[in-house]
Image (cartoon, rainbow, N blue to C red):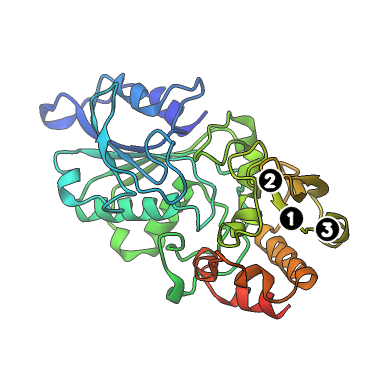
Amino acid sequence: MFGLDVLLARPAIPLPHGRPKTRVGLLAHAASRDLNGVHAAHRLMEKPDWQLLRLFSPEHGFHGTGAAGEIIHSQTHPELNLPIHSLYGDTRTPPPEWLEGLDLMVIDLQDLGIRCYTYASTLQNVLLACASAKLPVLVLDRPTPLAGIVDGPDLDPRFRSFVGQIDLPLVYGLSQGELARHLQQHDPRLKYLDLEVISATLPSHELPWYPPSPAIGSPQSARLYPLTVWCEAIPDVSVDRGGARSFQIWAMPDLEPDVLIPKLQQPGLRIESGRSEKEGWPALCFHLDPLADWKPVTTATHLLTQLRNQLGPDRLFAHPGARPEFFDKLMGTDQIRLQIKKG
């Protein structure tokens, strides 16, 4: 079960001081659903000892329809008639007035265990705001498809941003509940935060998959995301975003897949030649064993170096529209890009 299902199976707990219900805020998105696909907001409204007062949403919005980087404005939930405070709009940290009158903040976000996937930054910001407001936090956990996989550079403070905020390796392999505990242990500002985590009872591959963002439509896309996300800063390389194999391919108009494939294979990862659905370009199509213990950022760096050697030293980052500064923010350092450029 997800942490949400475990919570709902608990009996109601009487509140002290005669208060009839716990006043609750919920940070959630489109993937915040129980085993039967019912959204957490609807399920928590059913809890007799809770009163759901406010909703909060991360990047892509509460309903999961926003594009990557799209500003999301606060709104009202059309069915529940509750305010949805956006944490990816005018502010990315809840101000004190949004937390006033709450007894508990509940967080239920499907995450990927990757530093540049912004739900990690949102979690940290909300924990800090709740600690400042002395508001208890309950994290309803969901396992990450990259559980236990650690890879990539540590964060260089010079490149700290919302896509690189936490001081962990780029792929850190923790769920949101595990990350919350880690942050509390290592950040003195969270030392006295009243934090509880309700863990899921099954691993990711045994639970239904609900997309946490529009382009991560399957567990395969989630597991391959840290291999392919760098192309967001290199527009000459397509990842078929929004297609059936979103974030599962690399495609370029002049790519030679058969030349590259023998140089890139590793245990658990199979690479085949194909074409992108959107552009029809030659593509490297990645297939990953669900339980593979692999190094996605190391593999991505090797692949980018092979592309550089095939296409020339200036092709990837000097191409019109390339965003080398965003690549560095995603990586949390400029050293990877500089080393790739040198071959």
At label 1, the amino acid type is Pro
Residue plotted at (42% across, 69% down): 160
Which disc is residue 11 wearing? Answer: none
Where residue 107 sits: x, y (%)? 36, 40
The residues bearing labels 3 and 2 have C-alpha atoms spaced at a distance of: 16 Å
Left or right: residue 175 compared with residue 254? left
| Residue type at numbered disc 3 | Glu
- Mark 2 or mark 1, earlier in chain: 1
Give the mark count. 3
162 relative to 305, above or below: above
Q: Name which residue lies at 26% across and 19% down.
A: 48
Q: Position of residue 36 (x, y in %)?
A: 50, 20
Q: Which residue is mark 2?
A: 279
User: Could you tell me how far apart the alpha carbons at marks 3 and 1 are, in whole angstroms?
Assistant: 9 Å
Q: Residue at 62% x, 78% y: name it.
A: 338
2 and 1 marks in contact (CB < 8 Å): yes
For label 2, the crowd category at 10 Å Cα-Cα, with few meaning under 14, some 14 to 19 and many 20 or more, is: few
User: Residue 217: image x %, image y %?
Assistant: 58, 36
Q: Element type at marker 2?
A: loop
Residue 256 image label:
3
Q: Nearer the viewer, mark 3 or mark 2?
A: 2
Compared across the picture, whether 228 is left or right of 311 comes to: left
Residue at the disc numbered 1:
253
Q: 75 and 139: which one is in front?
A: 75
